[in-house]
Image (spheres, rainbow, N blue to C red):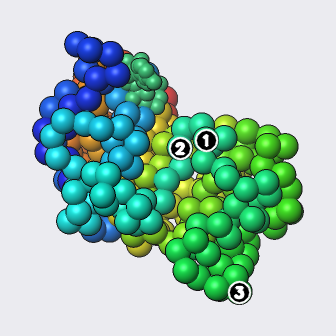
Amino acid sequence: MIECRNVSFAYEPGQKALDGVTFRVGPGEAVGLIGANGAGKSTLMKALLGLIECEGEILVDGRRVEKRTLADIRRRLGFVMQDSDDQMFMPTVYEDMLFGPMNYGLSREKAEARADAALERLGLQALRHRHNHRLSGGEKRMAAIATILAMEPAALLMDEPTSALDPYNRRRVIEIVRGLPQTRLIASHDLDMILDTCDRVLLLSGGRVAADGPADVLLRDRALLEAHRLELPLSLAGR
Ligand SMILES: Nc1ncnc2c1ncn2[C@@H]1O[C@H](COP(=O)(O)OP(=O)(O)OP(=O)(O)O)[C@@H](O)[C@H]1O
Ligand SMILES: [Mg+2]
């Protein structure tokens, strides 16, 4: 479903933010992307969306990510970016949620049914007609998640989906993400959330894949995590 072959990228000449990244994520798999600040997680997400031009090869659903295929690929990938202000086009939460599905050919009626279902699932009915730029940080994050659920994409890329969420909303998002049938790639420092939602973990360090394996093995490996400036998830820290 998602495949990177020897992907490299540098924002500044000589400073590689991604350095020979290779991995593949199968259909329906949930993979956590972890790593210290600056490890390259958001850069990898941008690469998968075709927002930056990399060396190497990236395939999404069998299609190579390149200028020619971008529109098609973005329709297959729902994404929550680290800064949700970057991904809102329309003034209100509801209009923003209708924009994607209608842009891809759904009738207004069908798009509204999807948007209503997503708002209800996340308990966000009260935000429906609110202005995006007048929402709190956590409300914006929840609205961005509702928007991609309404799109029903083939795969989801989520960059820090639980940052800024209160414990109740965080738990709600975890339950929903865990139950989704789609392929999911989730970048986060919330390793408890990764443990709850992902079967597999990719550890990035200095733009390279430092480890790739089962979540309940890698997230228990204190030496590995600490070597890459991470810590055991609280639920495994054994107080
Ligand atoms: N727009 C940019 N211009 C120049 N360098 C950048 C830019 N964005 C990121 N970088 C650099 O690229 C490297 C990878 O950054 P990236 O944002 O991918 O890290 P990250 O793993 O998402 O970190 P965080 O956990 O802080 O979100 C870092 O060294 C960062 O300073
Ligand atoms: Mg980031």
The numbered disc on residue 113 is: none
What element does badge 3 sit on?
helix
The quadrant in which residue 148 appears is bottom right
The numbered disc on residue 109 is: 3
Indicate the amino acid at tag 1: Asp
- Residue 114 vertical placement versus 124 (above, below): below
Q: Are marks 2 and 1 in contact (CB under 8 Å)?
A: yes
What element does badge 1 sit on?
helix
List the residue tagged with mark 1: 86
Q: Residue furthest top?
A: 14
List the residue tagged with mark 2: 81
Q: CA distance from mark 2 to mark 3?
A: 27 Å
Q: Earlier in the sequence, mark 2 or mark 3?
A: 2
What element does badge 2 sit on?
loop
Q: Residues within 10 Å of mark 2 (few under 14, many from 20)?
A: many
- Residue 148 vertical placement versus 66 (above, below): below
Q: Is mark 2 within 8 Å of ligand 2?
A: no
Is residue 222 in sight in this rendering? Answer: no
Relative depth, front residue between 179 and 155: 155
Q: Residues within 10 Å of mark 1 (few under 14, many from 20)?
A: few
